[in-house]
Amino acid sequence: MKNPDTFRSILVNHKLSFKNEGIFLLAGPPPSPNNRIIYISIVRSQIAEVLAILASLFAAEQITFKVIKNKMLAKQVLSGVFGEGHIGKVITIYLSGYVDQQEIIAQLIRLTSGYKGPAVPGRIHLGGLVYSSLPHKGMSATGQPSIANTRRFLNNKYMVTATLKQDVKGDVLKGLYFKGFMKLGKCVIKEGRYCMWSDDDGRDMKHRLEWQQHVHQDLAGVIQIPRIIALFEANQNSYLVMEFIKGETLTKVIDSIYKGRTWLQLSLNERNRLLNLLLQVVNALAKLHEKGYLHRDVTPENFLVSPTQELYLIDMEMAYSARQDYPSPAFGLGSPGYMSPQQELTQKPTVKEDIYGLAALMIVFLTNMPPKKFNLHNPVQTGVGIFFFTGDFPIAGTLVKCLNKAPYHRPSLSTIKSHIHSFITHQQHKADDRGAFEIAVFPEKAEVLNLISLALEGLTISELFKPKTGLAPGMAGILYLLYKTGPSGCGIRTLNFFSNYLKPHFDSILIQKKPAGLLEGATGQSLLLHYGISTGMCSCLSENLDKIKNSFYTISNQFDLANGIAGQALAALLICDTAPTDFLKERIGTYIKMLIQVQKDDGSWTVDSIAENAYNGLYGLTNGIPGIIVALIKCDGLLPDDQTKAAIQKGLDWLKRSMKNQSQLNVYPHIALSFLYAYEHSGNQTHRDMAEKLLWQCPGHAVSANYSLINGMAGVGFVYAEAARICKHPEWKKRAAWVYHVLSNTIHTKGKNKISWHMGTANPHDLSLLTGTPGIILFLLKFKELYNPTNQYTH
């Protein structure tokens, strides 16, 4: 195994002192804001060599610089994992005014000439591998040309008409070209940016496109695959031009068939359409294997379905020829969730890798969810989940075998094809009792309590957990859960873990001054401190109580729950539930008056519904009108007032008038929650009728890859559980149970007593209350309340 600290050893060899700074090693004196910043971009196969050359210059001139720690991190930086703005910034140099900057830059250009590196986005190329935000004296600097200037025409032959897909390694473009005298043809142009995705063998996107051209030409007439028109270079980038095939990706086709439903809710025709497409995938892979090729990236995005339902393979750059043993080693890895354990370990490819990838694709066909939602490391557990969604033991068993960690246990394509045909026959024979498995049995209370306990324990497994100071990012949300469950609910071990982890952060975090805001501002800090005191993780000292009090003096200039007055009011109310004070009641009264004063004549409020982090905009709970109404309803329970009730009614009337044509799954539950709480508060039957009218329009057995509390499955389940508690109608209890079963059948087990869910965010085990696993736990806690004997259900 190669030493991951190669770059560290180079600095040591040159007697350069350094320290860790995030993903970098920082050498030399601390940089100054007045320093001129220079970037060195290098492909990872050449980093060690170039760094060794430059280190002598840095040591001699006492230049401050930072370099990426190791090759693994370099790969992530160069491939855009940390964002496009970090691409190419392998070495960052800080030039002070005490050195001859022009001479140093000239030396850097000379020393790095002859090496390769991708362009640094938004920076000027000075020469060699050197980039800067300022031109070098006496040189004509070239920056990153705009798309409009460089892509109007390519190679003087291809006119770009649209961008089909943006990607850091190169975009996929749609274009026109002359295919004959006065005859235009449509084409797809796949771009490979210079030196992007360069591997340890020095191969980059240019080599991948050259290989894809060869594969397409070799497979022409064997399988449905776009015809290659040309391969050329322009501005150092490579471009592969192929014929345009009208159609949609498998991803879009599958989603358009499901429409938020489950397999058991699909009609027989819809199921057959999906299974016939799946058989086309199997047949295409079989033909590939007969020609000696392995696909190695069997994802729905790499297949196109034409209007006549013909299947095309559209992206073959990851393919491998077993007959030629080429490319050697095989290119890259593949798509997460579709790679076998052997492919992740970069072992020599075999047909069994495609069997694993096919199984992952079958999960998408049968559930319309990414395979990563299931615990692929435990095939049996995945099989149980697939049975829940399909009600078919044989097809679930087939997937279990295909996902086996040992390649020799995976079945052949012909066996899989036979099982799919049997599955099709089974669908036809069982058409009359379709949906028998879709009614989720209400689970035993002990089962729910156990799942909550395991999920709370699972919060301790995330390596990416870095507590922040707001309700959404981490600490306050987790402390709220621990407060709600108590030691008996979460377990002493879990409580001790967070106690030991969080205690050191209180003093350093809570002294930070932030603007008012529930999610990431001072209001969230007050809740954090309150629940820290309530759970015993923070001392109940007068200075801490003063911090809580002081956070409520400022009045936000916004009005929503996330960052505005409604959030301040709700936070004060939550604290008042356990620690009521006259001061907090006075602040709540002030917040209510402010919200009433700024309410528009039509009953709405001005909210930042298009903010980057706004969830569901105007009709969302955190950034929209429903959240403000909920805050007013809850506050009116503590401080009843006729003006508040009138404002609530005006807001509800506005929602009734303006919510047409909104997305049902994402928005209707938020709006329904406002009416549910209004009914619970006032007893007005019209509010209940409106809430239930909205919920009846939502899918009865919804399935979404989004599991979040704010706009996903956990949030929908939370609303159904509240509807069951408030309205006492058995339908809402049944729907809440459905959400519970979807979640319980897609858990990821971590050891003996820990579980989590793949949330689909940048951090797959997200610990935010709004978007992560804590939101699921909050739903489970709400679902648990339905076992209360007082919750009787009537039609």
Image (cartoon, rainbow, N blue to C red):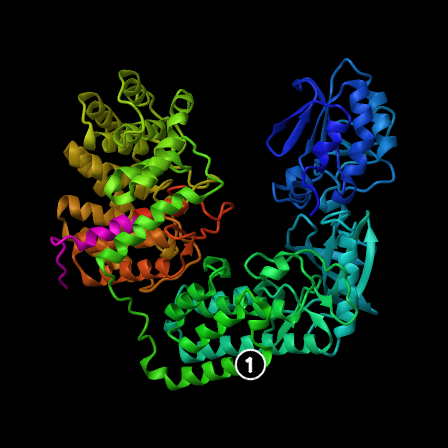
User: Closest to the observer: 139 or 780?
Assistant: 780
Which quadrant is the C terminus positioned in?
Answer: bottom left
What are the residue bounds of the magenta stretch? 779-795
Percent coordinates x, y for residue 667 in the rendering:
36, 52
Residue 296 in magenta stretch? no
Using the rendered image of the protein, determine whether residue 562 is visible from the camera's viewpoint: no
Residue that appears at 34% across and 40% down? 494
Considering every residue shown, the one lying at the far top of the view is 98
Residue at the (38%, 25%) spot, across then down = 506
- Indicate the amino acid at tag 1: Thr
The answer to whether any part of residue 198 appears in the image is yes
Residue 407 coordinates in the image, percent (x, y): 59, 68
Rendered residue at 25%/59% (across/down): 693
Q: Which percent across, then down, holds residue 201?
A: 78, 51
Circle 1: is it few (<14), some (14-19), or many (20+) Cα within 10 Å?
few
Say which residue label 1 marks: 415
On screen, 522 above or below 713? above
Name the element at disc 1: helix
Residue 790 belongs to magenta span: yes
Q: Quadrant of residue 446 in the image?
A: bottom left
Side of 65 where 740 appears, left or right: left
